[in-house]
Amino acid sequence: MCQPQGSFPHKEWGQILFIPCKAQRADVGGEAAGASINHSQMLLQRLQDLLRQGNASDVVLRVQAAGTDEVRAFHAHRLLLGMHSELFRELLGNQSEVLLQEPRDCAAVFDKFIRYLYCGELTILLAQAIPLHRLATKYRVASLQRGVADYMRAHLAGGAGPAVGWYHYAVSTGDEALRESCLQFLAWNLSAVAGSAEWGAVSPELLAQLLQRSDLVLQDELELFHALEAWLGRARPPPTVAERALRAIRYPMIPPAQLFQLQARSAALARHGLAVADLLLQAYQFHAASPLHYAKFFHVNGSAFLPRNYLAPAWGAPWVINNPARDDRSTSFQTQLGPSGHDAGRRITWNVLFSPRWLPVSLRPVYADTAGTALPAARPEDGRPRLVVTPASSGGDAAGVSFQKTVLVGARHQGRLLVRHAYSFHQSSEEAGDFLAHADLQRRNSEYLVENALHLHLIVKPVYHTLIRTPS
C-alpha cells in the first residue's frame, strides 16, 4: 500500500512499514534481480514418478531381448523421448506402441537408458558400459555417448576397466579417443595384462599394434617374447600372422645366453624359426661387436635396436617418495651403457633431483638479496613439481649413443601397482617439461599418490645413431 505524499508511515500491523511507491518498486526490483528459486530436484522427482507410474503416457515401448521371449514394457511419453533422440521422434511418429529388439545385455539395462532420458543421470557399473554406449549410439543420444565414453576412459586410467574388450569395442564403433586410451593403458601395463585372462582375447590386429610400440612397459624383451609365445599357443593364428608377430620382437635387446636358450627350447621358434633366422643372426652380430664398430657396417637406428621401457635393474630403478609435497629429494642409480653384450659391464651413474615446488635459484628466498632488491615475478610453471636427471660425469657417453629418459608414475589398483602416467625427455634436456604439470600433491586422495607416496620408476634408454658406413 502506498501513502499519499506528505503523510507519515504507520508503525503498526505487526511492525510492517509502508514506504513510498517509488522506493517500494526499487526495492522489489532489487530483490527480484538477486533472488533464485530452485525446484529442480522436485522436478526430477516428478519426472521419475512420471516414468515409474506411467501417468499420461502416450506410447508403450516393448523391449524384447534377442533370442528370448522376454519382453519388458515401458510406458513412456513421446515428447520426452523425442527431445533427446531424433531417432525416437522418427520411430514413434503417430504410433502408440513399438517393439524394440535389443541384444540381451542392452535389454538388461534399457531401464537405465530410459531413466537417463527422463532424469539426465544414471548409475553405471563396468559391465554395463558397453551396452549403455550401444544404446546411446543406436538411438543417437550424444550426451549419453560422451558420458559413458568418459566413464570408460576414467576407469581405464585407474586400471579398473577391461581394456582389451573395450579396445575391440572402440574399434567396432569408430571411437578413436577410447581406442587410443585403451591402447595406451595396455602399452603401459602390458605385464599385468599378459598375465590375465584378457590376454587370450587380444586380436591379431591389437597384438600387431602393441608389438610395434617402443613405450611398452615390461621387465625386459624376453618377457614380451614369452607373452607372445603364450598368445600363439592360445590363439593358434595362421603361420603368416605368427611369423609377422615373431619378427616384431627386438632380438638385439635379448642377451646372447637367453637367445641360445630360446632357440633350444622355444616351441614357437621350433615351428617358425626360419622366418626369424636373419633377425637372430643380426642380434648375435650386434652382441659380438662394439656398437661403434657395428654401426660402421649396419644401420642401428631402427626400432630393433631401441629398448622399450624395461623395468629390469640394468635400465633404471624404482623410487618411492613419501610425502612428496614437502621437501626436495635426491637419489642416484646406475644403468648399463647399452644393450650390446660388448657394453654389459659398463655403467653410467645418474643423479636425480625432485622438488615439489621448484623455484629458480634467483627466486629462492635463501639466495635473495636481503638489502631490498626486488625479485623477478615467478612464473606459474615455477611452482609445479620438477624432476631433473643428469649423468654423474660427462665422460661416460659412448660415441654414437644418446639417452632417452622416461619417468613412470604408478597408481595402485586392487593390490597391483599400475602405470598411470609416463613422461619422456631426451638427452638434450635434463628434465621433463610437463612432469606432473596438473598434479595436486597436496591432496591425500590425489590420483598421483599411493598411500601419500609418489611411486616413480626411472628408466634410461640408450639410442644408437648410425655412423658413416664403411664402403663394401
Image (cartoon, rainbow, N blue to C red):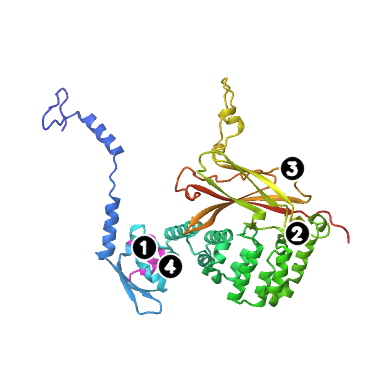
Label 1 sits on residue: 82
Give 52 or 205, whichever is nearer the viewer: 205
Looking at marks 2 and 4 on the same chain, the residue that comes earlier in the sequence is marked by: 4
Quarter occupied by the C terminus: bottom right
Label 3 sits on residue: 394
Q: Is residue 400 above or below residue 125?
A: above
Density class for disc 2 (Cα within 10 Å; few <14, some 14-19, many ≥20) is: many
Please give left or right for residue 126 compared with residue 73 in the image.
right
**Amino acid type at image mark 3:** Ser
Looking at marks 3 and 4 on the same chain, the residue that comes earlier in the sequence is marked by: 4
* Residue 12 image-quadrant placement: top left
Which numbered circle lies on residue 341?
A: 2
Give 151 or 358, whichever is nearer the viewer: 358
Residue 323: give x, y in percent of width and height. 50, 43
Instruction: Find out whether the residues at labels 1 and 2 contact each other: C-beta distance under 8 Å.
Output: no
Density class for disc 3 (Cα within 10 Å; few <14, some 14-19, many ≥20) is: few
Label 4 sits on residue: 131
Depth check, mark 2 against mark 4: the one in front is: 2
Instruction: Find out whether the residues at labels 2 and 3 contact each other: C-beta distance under 8 Å.
Output: no
Q: Which residues are magenta?
A: 80-95
In magenta stretch: residue 48: no
Depth check, mark 1 against mark 2: the one in front is: 2
- The secondary element bearing badge 3 is classed as loop
Quarter occupied by the N terminus: top left
- The secondary element bearing badge 1 is classed as helix
* Residue 429 image-quadrant placement: top right
What's the distance in space between the residues labelled 3 and 4, CA to CA?
57 Å
Residue 272: give x, y in percent of width and height. 70, 75
Looking at marks 1 and 3 on the same chain, the residue that comes earlier in the sequence is marked by: 1
Give 31 or 284, whichever is nearer the viewer: 284
* Residue 244 image-quadrant placement: bottom right
